[in-house]
Image (tube, helix red, strand yellow):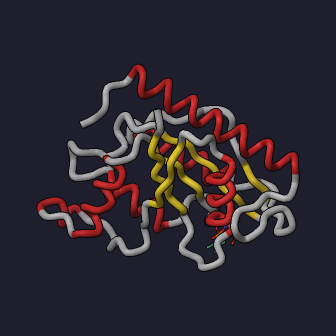
Amino acid sequence: NTYRIGYFVGSLATHSINRTLSKALIRLATPDLEFFEIPIKDLPLYSYDYDAEYPAEGKALKDAIASADAVLFVTPEYNRSIPGALKNAIDWASRPWGSNSFAHKPSAVIGASPGALGTAIAQQSLRSVLSFCDSPQMNAPEAYVRFKPDVFTSDGGVVDEHTEHFLRNFMEEFRDHIVRVLTVLPRKP
Ligand code: FNR
């Protein structure tokens, strides 16, 4: 079996270190995982006024998640939480009421920061959002990446052996998590 992974990069920055991390994760993943990015940058700010008629960007977001077997969040920490653009995308996907795109959708969270905490606090915040959205998250391993520019090349190469091993293991565990969830949980909707 192959599994389709829709991934979110929480940063809109041109030289995002989290985008670099996403490239590294894709390169290190097991060959049975296929990846496509779920873009968030063109979504308007969500309001329930849109629920009656979602704009094209909102529909595309929900279709993309529906077509994925699982979702992966690669996000920076902004002010000890997740970036507003990512929260906005999650809010869009969780609605209209009764058609929450994350229900029963396996997920994993990871992120990189130049700081020592490696996005740990943002990830806690994201985990609580995903819990509410009924997404079965991979609990372990956690991955708090302290980004050092000499460890990653811009196209996602990982120079440091320990980091490479750690990230490869994270993706193997994610694959196993997806297989387990898809075995026991019926898909929604
Ligand atoms: C940051 N940064 C940051 N880092 C961190 O570890 N904890 C934090 O709470 C914050 N807060 C924060 C707020 C805002 C508005 C910005 C712009 C930045 C620094 C951040 O980790 C750094 O800019 C990374 O490069 C962000 O990742 P991307 O966007 O490059 O992927």
Q: Residue furthest top?
A: 184
The residue lying at 54 percent from left, 74 percent from top is 12
Say which quarter of the image contains residue 22.
Answer: bottom right
Frontmost residue, 122 versus 185: 185
User: Where residue 168 sits in the image (x, y, percent)?
Assistant: 72, 43
On the rendered image, what quadrant is the C terminus found in?
A: top left
Between 41 and 129, the one nearer to me in the picture: 41
Q: How many marks?
A: 0
Measured along the vertical axis of the image, is residue 129 above or below residue 81?
Answer: above
Q: Quadrant of ligand 1?
A: bottom right
- Eyeballing the image, is 121 above or below 169? below
Q: In this view, does 188 lie above or below 184?
A: below
Q: Position of residue 26 (x, y in %)?
A: 61, 53
Q: Residue at x 62, y 40 (%)?
A: 30
Q: Is residue 105 left or right of 152 when viewed as pictured?
A: left
Q: Position of residue 15 (x, y in %)?
A: 65, 77
Q: Nearer the viewer, residue 23 or 113?
A: 23
Farthest residue in the bottom direction? 14
Q: Position of residue 42 (x, y in %)?
A: 37, 75
